[in-house]
Image (cartoon, rainbow, N blue to C red):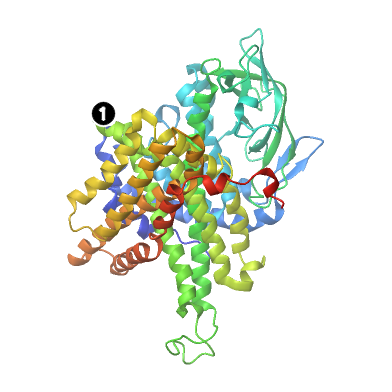
């Protein structure tokens, strides 16, 4: 089926719930008027459905092809044409800085476009997606000369970028990297080493690829404090010469087969230092944090496509009769959407998707406020929430994105297990999102081990102020008592970690994953209460899209009755501590 952009839900969230349409009142985002935001939603939805989606299945079946003699990679049929249209439409430049050819629009709009692209072809979306992280790192940390050389062509999509971090012997523990950077006489560096799992390391969409490479200078400490960041182009901009940065092969993957995931060999390739020596981790986190938010949108995009496919199938597939009597009396059976168990699956998909979209756009709106609001205290509070919620957005949206695709496969039954239907590809494509850019377990450890204590606990205090402030200001808030209980559970779990983790770090490790999920469910509960409140007010006033608004009220009730109660066992999981988790001795595992 053809993708339908969730335009009505997006407008409801952006305009009626979050107030993103008011960003044009800030000087930085003066051009982001409600009319422009609506145009972005409509045009991005059209591009996704008409240009990007047709390349998805063929990309999965053909995959990328590697030529070992030339070290070149050919992308699947139609990818280059679709990418060209994406570039010509200005989509790569949407939220990039104006002085380097960008449009300077809010980050929230990029989140919207990211979801649509990932719904329709996650593999294709990876190429401009990772480029954006390279743009942000160079803009934040690069010299004026590097910015002038690279940013405009990256922003306008003439060139693409990569993040070259992982090596065969190390993934998350980047202190173990072996790639070396030796100074040249001309101020550049000779980069020697091998990187693996490099998205877009080599392809035929553009003529030049700009690699951002982590490496160590001579004499640098063998820890993360000895890492520097270098920009290493495939083709040297001044001379047009081929830089010895070659693809050594493609990874053989279960999904995202249209995305070129490369082994990259740097054989004395010329590179230039980004930022200060041995300060590469700071620049790397600029790329990584942005990539984590983007990966969260990948999870949401796949979940939305899975829901649309599931819903379409459930409305047409005839099987058995409704338990309450025939609903299709003139046919041989009823559509399976009448059956409670099928409805449970569809409702879970729909309600979580809309909650996850609210969470992502809430974070995106705070990101925009953190860089554009005139009040320093507003900027700081918004930045607190962005930092705190980045691992939550990445993990929860990719966990549930995969779960929702898997649920969609179940709705289709045996059809879902075949390649004749798109669900099995969505399941395979979505599985990686829980792993790359830091596994979800590492995201949880970042939340518990670093974010909770950052700035003396200020980040989490800002979140609780947001949640409790809403209840104080809205004494008649929908589902108030359930939300109040969720906040209390999150507060209790937070205090338990604060009391136990300093004495025993393994307690934090054991609590991390359930704590992240508890925080996600609680923040989404807050957003569902807000959505239900707005929907009810518009219905009372006789305004808005009545089916959408009535659906919001039912969906909120489903969330609070059927999904939020999970917080009870999450709290129990956290506060029961590490004992049963860590009690096994070595000989217990295979006894």
The quarter holding residue 412 reads bottom right
Residue 6 at x, y = what percent? 41, 59
Number of other residues with Cα within 10 Å of mark 1, as a class: few under 14, some 14 to 19, many 20 or more:
few
Residue 502 at x, y = what percent? 43, 32
Q: Is residue 378 left or right of residue 417?
A: left
Q: Residue at x 45, y 51 (%)?
A: 44
Q: 526 and 53: which one is in front?
A: 526
Q: 272 and 559: which one is in front?
A: 559
Q: Residue at x 34, y 55 (%)?
A: 525
Q: Residue at x 39, y 65 (%)?
A: 562
Q: Residue furthest top?
A: 185
Q: Is residue 147 above or below residue 385?
A: above
Q: 577 and 129: which one is in front?
A: 577
Residue 395 at x, y = what percent? 49, 47
Q: What secondary structure is found at the residue carrying circle 1?
A: helix
Q: Is residue 218 left or right of residue 106?
A: right
Q: Residue furthest right?
A: 69
Residue 384 at x, y = what percent? 34, 35
Q: Is residue 284 above or below residue 93?
A: above
- Which image quarter is the N terminus in? bottom right
Q: Is residue 529 visible?
A: yes
Residue where numbered disc 1 is placed: 376
Q: Is residue 308 above or below residue 318?
A: above
């Amino acid at each position: 089926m053809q993708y339908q952009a969730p335009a009505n839900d997006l407008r409801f969230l952006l305009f009626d719930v979050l107030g993103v349409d008011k960003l044009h009142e800030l000087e930085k985002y003066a051009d982001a008027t409600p009319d422009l935001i609506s145009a972005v939603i409509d045009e991005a939805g059209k591009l996704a459905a008409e240009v990007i989606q047709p390349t998805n299945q063929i990309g999965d079946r053909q995959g990328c092809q590697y030529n070992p003699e030339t070290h070149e990679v050919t992308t699947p049929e139609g990818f280059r044409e679709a990418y060209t249209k994406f570039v010509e439409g200005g989509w790569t430049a949407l939220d990039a800085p104006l002085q380097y050819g960008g449009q300077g629009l809010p980050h929230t709009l990029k989140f919207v476009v990211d979801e649509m692209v990932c719904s329709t072809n996650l593999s294709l979306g990876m190429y401009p997606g990772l480029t954006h992280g390279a743009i942000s790192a160079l803009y934040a940390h690069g010299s004026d000369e590097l910015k002038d050389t690279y940013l405009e062509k990256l922003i306008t999509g003439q060139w693409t970028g990569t993040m070259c971090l992982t090596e065969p012997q190390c993934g998350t523990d980047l202190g173990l990297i072996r790639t070396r950077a030796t100074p040249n006489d001309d101020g550049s560096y000779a980069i020697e080493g091998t990187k693996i799992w490099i998205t877009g390391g080599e392809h035929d969409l553009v003529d030049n690829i700009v690699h951002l490479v982590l490496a160590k200078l001579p004499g640098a400490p063998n820890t993360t404090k000895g890492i520097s960041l270098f920009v290493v182009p495939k083709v040297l901009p001044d001379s047009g010469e081929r830089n010895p940065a070659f693809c050594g092969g493609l990874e053989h993957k279960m999904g995202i087969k249209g995305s070129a995931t490369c082994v990259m060999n740097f054989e004395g390739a010329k590179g230039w230092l980004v930022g200060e020596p041995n300060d590469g981790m700071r620049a790397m986190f600029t790329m990584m944090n942005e990539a984590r938010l983007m990966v969260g949108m990948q999870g949401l995009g796949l979940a939305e496509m899975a829901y649309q496919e599931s819903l379409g199938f459930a409305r047409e597939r005839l099987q058995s009769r409704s338990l309450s009597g025939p609903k299709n009396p003139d046919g041989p059976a009823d559509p399976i959407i009448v059956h409670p168990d099928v409805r449970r699956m569809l409702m879970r998909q729909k309600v979580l998707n809309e909650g996850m979209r609210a969470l992502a756009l809430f974070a995106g709106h705070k990101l925009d406020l953190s860089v554009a609001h005139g009040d320093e205290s507003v900027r700081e509070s918004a930045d607190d929430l962005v930092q705190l919620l980045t691992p939550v957005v990445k993990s929860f949206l990719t966990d549930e994105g995969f779960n929702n695709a898997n649920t969609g496969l179940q709705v289709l039954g045996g059809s879902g297990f075949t390649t004749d239907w798109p669900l099995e590809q969505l399941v395979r494509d979505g599985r990686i999102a829980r792993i790359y850019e830091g596994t979800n377990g590492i995201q949880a450890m970042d939340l518990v081990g670093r974010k909770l204590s950052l700035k003396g606990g200020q980040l989490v205090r800002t979140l609780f102020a947001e949640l409790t402030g809403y209840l104080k200001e809205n004494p008649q808030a929908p589902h108030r008592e359930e939300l109040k209980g969720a906040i209390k559970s999150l507060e209790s779990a937070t205090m338990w970690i604060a009391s136990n983790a300093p004495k025993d770090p393994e307690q934090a490790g054991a609590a991390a994953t359930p704590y992240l999920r508890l925080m996600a469910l609680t923040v989404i509960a807050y957003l569902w209460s807000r959505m239900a409140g707005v929907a009810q007010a518009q219905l009372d006033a006789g305004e808005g899209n009545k089916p959408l608004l009535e659906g919001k009220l039912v969906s909120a009730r489903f969330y609070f009755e059927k999904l939020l109660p999970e917080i009870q066992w999450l709290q129990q999981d956290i506060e029961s501590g590490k004992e049963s988790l860590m009690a096994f001795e070595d000989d217990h595992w295979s006894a």
